[in-house]
Image: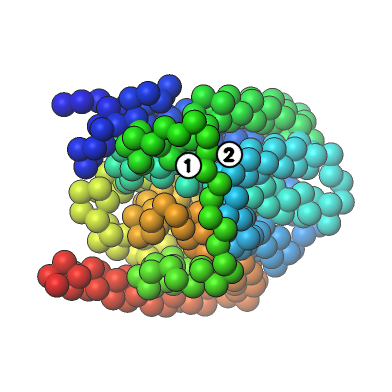
């Protein structure tokens, strides 16, 4: 059998003349994500305690982290279509990484709540700028490797950084007596490495769409992409919109780690220095869940996502417990849910929408999920202050509705195969 650089799953001639095979591209792109994750996941692991240190309440933590996640997702409604229209996927990806790796070290210098909140949101805006373009670039190579496996391996590498970052932050916090400044400033080093590597990868493979095309198109000059009309986004497939509704519902009933860590620290369950360690453990679970569900998705299809609302419903019931062991278990389940959301859920979007509108689809999908993230962060923070049992009940109800939407999607898929 020919290697992945020679032949696609459909049997077409592969991109043999590209300097990197599809799998190597996926792995190197994963290393970029890994280094970036050292930066922003290291920072996110202490977001709740940092904001609390600066005087934030649970509601403020929920709003800031929820708006941050919303910014990372809703703004993709702009960056996705613009990436499709310009065709400059690499430029958008590099610009987004640059904003993230600058914002996090500056957070280490913040001593005022609103400044810290603004930098947390700015870091998430960087993700909004790069993510539709980055996902599109990755999906082009993953068309050769298998989308579930490609996105899964990428997420696993990504989460290796999410493991190292929080552990490094925890070590610096322990060594400085809980001083957040040095812990965040040292993240400038992996940030610079991530930026240098993504620029190198762009130079090596300027046109990764050739992976998906089978390497057959080798024009001397790039053809400018067709400009899309503003209404074209509405012509995304109907199943895509239903799938976006499913993902949005699961995210609405999903608390941010900022709220979870707030509970752990203010509830006296863990010291602030231990929270990044627990976050790192959750990222290990995230990586394992991404690879396993990605492999299962390539074999079984969308049905594997039944696990998503079921696991998400269990998170608040466990994580907001007053018992340390149960709360820790809840955070680990939270990590598994995140792994599915960041890999297999994205792989499905790439399979639902063709390459010409894929960045737009990723952007729209991110916008839908982003609104849900904002609602979920504020909902979790607000209900936590009122009643944890009520928070658990509301989350469970939302996940039941999400499961119902997924059942409709599965029935439509089955009917399409029969037809």
Where is residue 144 shown, x and y percent of the image? 31, 38
Q: Looking at the image, which residue sits at the far right? A: 112
Q: Residues within 10 Å of mark 1 (few under 14, many from 20)?
A: many
**N-terminal label among 2 and 1:** 2
Q: Could you say which is closer to the camera, residue 3 or residue 373?
A: 3
Residue 394 vertical position relative to residue 96 in the rendered view, above or below: below
Q: CA distance from mark 2 to mark 1?
A: 8 Å
Where is residue 185 shown, x and y percent of the image? 76, 32
Task: Report the residue marked by disc 1.
Answer: 137
Total labels drawn: 2
Is 55 on the left or on the right of 193, as rendered? right
Residue 242 vertical position relative to residue 29 in the rendered view, above or below: below
On the rendered image, what quadrant is the C terminus found in? bottom left
Which of the 4 image quarters holds residue 7? top left
Measuring 41% from the left and 45% from the top, which residue is drawn there?
139
Q: Looking at the image, which residue sits at the far left? A: 418
Measuring 21% from the left and 42% from the top, which residue is drawn there?
10
Task: Report the residue marked by disc 2.
Answer: 90
Measuring 64% from the left and 30% from the top, which residue is drawn there?
195
Residue 59 vertical position relative to residue 6 in the rendered view, above or below: below
Where is residue 404 shown, x and y percent of the image? 32, 76
Q: Could you say which is closer to the camera, residue 190 or residue 77?
A: 77
Query: Can residue 252 be seen?
Result: no
């Amino acid at each position: 059998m020919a290697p992945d650089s020679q032949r696609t799953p459909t049997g077409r001639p592969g991109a043999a003349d590209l300097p990197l095979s599809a799998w190597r591209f996926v792995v190197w792109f994963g290393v970029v994500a890994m280094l970036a994750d050292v930066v922003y996941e290291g920072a996110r692991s202490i977001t709740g305690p940092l904001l609390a240190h600066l005087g934030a309440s649970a509601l403020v933590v929920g709003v800031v982290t929820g708006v941050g996640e919303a910014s990372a997702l809703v703004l993709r409604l702009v960056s996705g279509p613009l990436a499709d229209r310009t065709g400059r996927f690499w430029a958008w990806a590099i610009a987004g990484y640059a904003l993230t790796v600058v914002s996090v070290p500056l957070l280490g210098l913040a001593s005022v709540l609103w400044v810290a909140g603004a930098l947390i949101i700015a870091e998430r805006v960087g993700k909004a700028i790069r993510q539709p373009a980055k996902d599109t670039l990755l999906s082009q190579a993953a068309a050769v490797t298998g989308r579930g496996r490609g996105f899964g391996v990428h997420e696993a590498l990504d989460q290796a950084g999410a493991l190292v970052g929080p552990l490094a932050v925890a070590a610096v916090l322990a060594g400085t007596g809980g001083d957040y400044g040095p812990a965040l400033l040292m993240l400038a080093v992996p940030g610079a490495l991530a930026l240098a590597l993504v620029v190198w990868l762009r130079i090596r493979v300027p046109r990764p769409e050739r992976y998906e095309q089978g390497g057959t198109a080798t024009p001397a000059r790039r053809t400018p992409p067709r400009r899309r009309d503003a209404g074209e986004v509405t012509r995304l497939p109907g199943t895509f919109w239903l799938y976006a509704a499913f993902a949005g519902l699961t995210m609405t009933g999903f608390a941010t780690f900022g709220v979870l860590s707030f509970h752990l620290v203010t509830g006296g369950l863990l010291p602030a220095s231990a929270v990044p360690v627990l976050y790192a453990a959750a990222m290990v679970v995230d990586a394992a869940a991404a690879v396993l569900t990605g492999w299962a998705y390539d074999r079984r299809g969308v049905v594997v996502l039944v696990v998503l609302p079921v696991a998400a419903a269990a998170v608040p019931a466990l994580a907001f417990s007053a018992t340390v062991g149960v709360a820790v278990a809840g955070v680990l389940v939270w990590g598994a849910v995140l792994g599915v959301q960041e890999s297999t859920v994205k792989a499905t979007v790439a399979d639902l929408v063709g390459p010409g509108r894929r960045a737009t689809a990723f952007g729209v999908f991110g916008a839908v999920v982003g609104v849900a993230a904002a609602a979920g962060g504020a909902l979790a923070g607000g209900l936590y202050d009122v009643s944890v049992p009520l928070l658990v009940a509301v989350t469970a109800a939302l996940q039941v509705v999400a499961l119902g939407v997924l059942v409709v999607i599965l029935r439509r898929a089955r009917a399409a195969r029969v037809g």
